[in-house]
Amino acid sequence: MSLDRRPEPLSGWGRYPRHQTIGLHPADAAEVSRAAAAAAGGIARGNGRAYGDAAVGAEETIHLGRLDRFVSFDPETGLLVGEAGLLLAEIIAVMVPRGWFVPVVPGTRFVTLGGMVAADVHGKNHHAAGSFCDHVAWIEIDDGSGGRRRCDREADPMLFAATCGGVGLTGVICTVAVRMQRIETAMIRQRRLRVGGLDAAMEAFEANLATTYSVAWIDCLATNAALGRSALFLGEHALCDELPAARRARPLELPASGSRPIPVDFPDFALSRPVVRSFNALYYRRQSDAEGLVDLLPYFFPLDSLLEWNRIYGRRGFVQYQCVLPLAASAAGLRLLLGAIAAAGAGSFLGVLKRMGPQSFGLLSFPREGYTLALDFPASPANLALLDRLDAITADHGGRIYLAKDARAAPATMAGYDRLDAFRALRAERGYATRFASRLSQRLEF
């Protein structure tokens, strides 16, 4: 029986750019193997939450949505094994009521297990726990050479390092084993700090490195003394005896999702500079210092309450710019980045600042010690030109952009990845360069 093959236009979550590809929709593991063996310019795709074109094949796109099963779980060790298409949302729904949580999560739970490996996702606790692949025990990959390969830190460690953060360019990730962490409750003990500028925000991050989770919303249109004003959200997993008495009988109960869809594409004026400036000013004023308990889902995944929130940016779509700067260069680099964004008036409702820990082991893993800034911009010619300027600032300060978020950068930006040559060499030696390619790898020439 032939594989289900369909011509289809595809984009990432940002809905920009859109490319024509041949979609392959394997129904089971055997069909995945056939797709990998026949791949020529193909890439695997999970739930399509990479923002740009990392999961759009140069020629073919292998959809893994049907490979979504739990394989096993060991309650003694916390080792969970799942197929690559298994959603993080499903893992949370099944495992949190049993007292287990994924040790590192991104900003949405609508990502797949394979996608979390391919992007080596990081979360609000990178400074304390590293990235997702630091908690992965092993991976099974179908690289098209016949059968699956299992790799880990001892068995084929170079393939493991190339796959963790390798944006799918070493083959089709089929199965992932991740070490879960125990939790007592489905709530977070949160402390919120409002800070008046970039220096104060960075000082607050540094003063709270012992806190497990930290993230800041940052006003990207503030200027002068208010440049970088932020609201910092600190968090710890709440313990049972910290819950209100009424909640202690059901400490691991997850809240109802309460997600609502965005029914239409927003018009351009909804993201005009006056609208964004007014929103950011109002939001900042409302973020007074406070402490309290919040449910796990809205703490980690606030945007998941709005299904299809990418429609806010209209039919043209949007791009997210995320970079990380080395610790020593972060203050100077962030000032220039925020200054350029504010001067251009290209504001974003969602500006996120995080403190990162040590560099991750993956050859193309994004995190390194320093600060990461992430912002969304409507996909307009003026904003794309602005992002070229932000690329230059990032490069001048020794930083790098996040491949899982990128939709438009030039090949020169890959200079920020100091282990790129080792990644290219492995792809060439094992024949992956002719089998697996995405629009991202084609555009960035790696």
Image (cartoon, grey):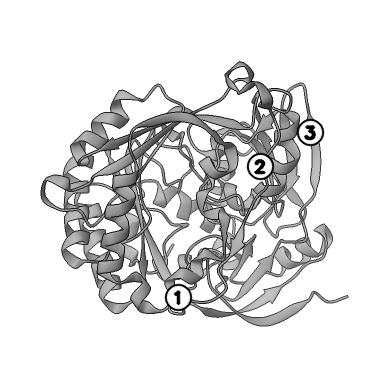
CA gap between label 1 and label 3 equals 43 Å
Q: On the picture, is 19 further left or further right than 374?
A: right
Q: Residue furthest front?
A: 246
Residue at which label 1 appears: 266
To which residue does mark 3 refer? 73
Residue 436 versus residue 200 in the image, above or below: below
Q: State the residue at coordinates (25%, 75%).
A: 382
367 horizontally vs 260: left or right: left
Tell me how far mark 2 sits from mark 1, CA to CA: 29 Å
Q: Nearer the viewer, residue 245 or 86?
A: 245
Q: Secondary structure at mark 1?
A: loop
In-front residue for pair 65/161 = 65
**Labels 2 and 3: the sequence-earlier one:** 3
Q: Residues within 10 Å of mark 3 (few under 14, many from 20)?
A: some
Residue at (26, 68) in percent of width and height: 273
Q: What residue does disc 2 label?
A: 255
Secondary structure of the residue carrying tag 2 is loop
